[in-house]
Amino acid sequence: MLMSRHDRSRSGRWTDNGPPSTEDVLPRWGDEDPSAKIPPFVREPGRNPWPQMEAGLKLVGVLMILTAMIAAGILAMPDRESAENSTPTADAAMVMVPNQEVPFGIGSPAAQGAEIKNDQRFSGMTICLDPGHGGNDRGFQRVATAAAPAMDESYLSLAIAKDLQVRLEQRGFTVVLTRSSTEANPQGLDANRDGRTSSDASSLEEAEQIAALDEVQARIDRCNDSRSDLILSIHIGNSNDVTERGSTVWYSDEREFSPYNQLFATLVFEELVLQLQQFGSPSPGSGAQAVTPGTATDLASGGTKYLLLAPELEVLKEPSQVPAVIAEVLMLSNDDDAAVIGSAAGVRAVSVSLERAIVRFIDLASLT
């Protein structure tokens, strides 16, 4: 039997007991496919056989009115084929440029006029959201094309995190952000306690690596210090193959709570696929993937983000204490995915999917 969160101590919050089978997951949410709703045919009424001239003239008048109404309705209806094959257009409010203020609440319940009911089950539970990159690290930078505008990953990940924060707080969660504007360690402090800061480096490359290690430790500290119950890091992926689309969710299988990591990653991926179906992606992505953080290759290639998932390592002061995943929600290098994530509707779909994955995980892991 899984422990409730009230039975977990600071040093032993999570055990290696496996989570429930994903076959027993809660029913998925989803909206009915609007393209399946086809307007019914409107039949022209039969001709009235009444022989009197007056009745015949009235019938002709009625038919003329009905014909005009039907014609106007047909002209107003969207073409079904074009509606099914349409590509979301980029929202001007989501076009990100350097030093631009991050839009708050795009697609959020407050912005959309929707209401999410507070649930007392989530009172006292803390979710740590980690918007990827930030500050001088802008993540993947996309150049403008005819399909989608220029965008920076760091701005988009923060916009999604702030939108998700609104939704989770309306449900009753306490939400902590590892960064609310720039980076988590703007002063460049020695967060990982290795005795080095970027100012001590002998090269630009070494300075960037030292700063990245201190940055990820500062994010881990923010989640640990807030006694979070769950960590979700938000990124937008990229690939040298611009045809690659969809979502990938990373987790570590080297932690004492690895079964929970895997469950959480699986639920996040399922909800992303479900919510993003409306945009017609032919490929759901790579799914939930285990990763081994902290290898020399990772650190040399900028893979320090995976240290958020890592167990105890020499480069860290301390690891994260609770289940965590890194969600690359879409591929910013792909034109179609970029058009989705560059729209208010796309941000809303991603935010909804992450919110629902969190709720499903908490229910399945019996944390309430």
Image (tube, rainbow, N blue to C red):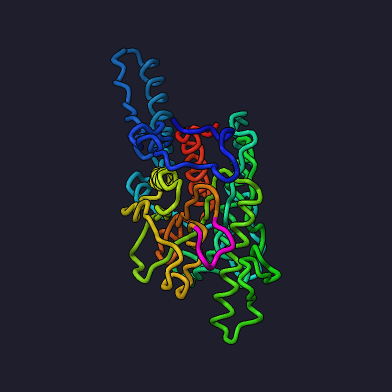
| x and y, in percent, of residue 268 in the image | 44, 46
Residue extending farthest to the right is 187
| x and y, in percent, of residue 76 in the image | 44, 41
- Magenta span has 317? yes
Residue at screen point 32% across, 22% down: 45
- Magenta span has 315? yes
Residue at screen point 50% across, 63% down: 313
Could one spot residue 95 in this view of the protein? yes
Residue at screen point 57% across, 55% down: 130
Residue extending farthest to the bottom is 202
- Specify start and end residues of the magenta stretch as a single range: 312-319
Magenta span: predominant SS is loop
**Quadrant of the snapshot with the C terminus:** top right
Compared with 93, 214 (above or below) is below
Q: Of 59 and 299, which appears nearest the observer?
A: 299
Q: Of 110 and 220, which appears nearest the observer?
A: 220
In the picture, residue 158 is in which quadrant? bottom right
Residue at screen point 41% across, 64% down: 335
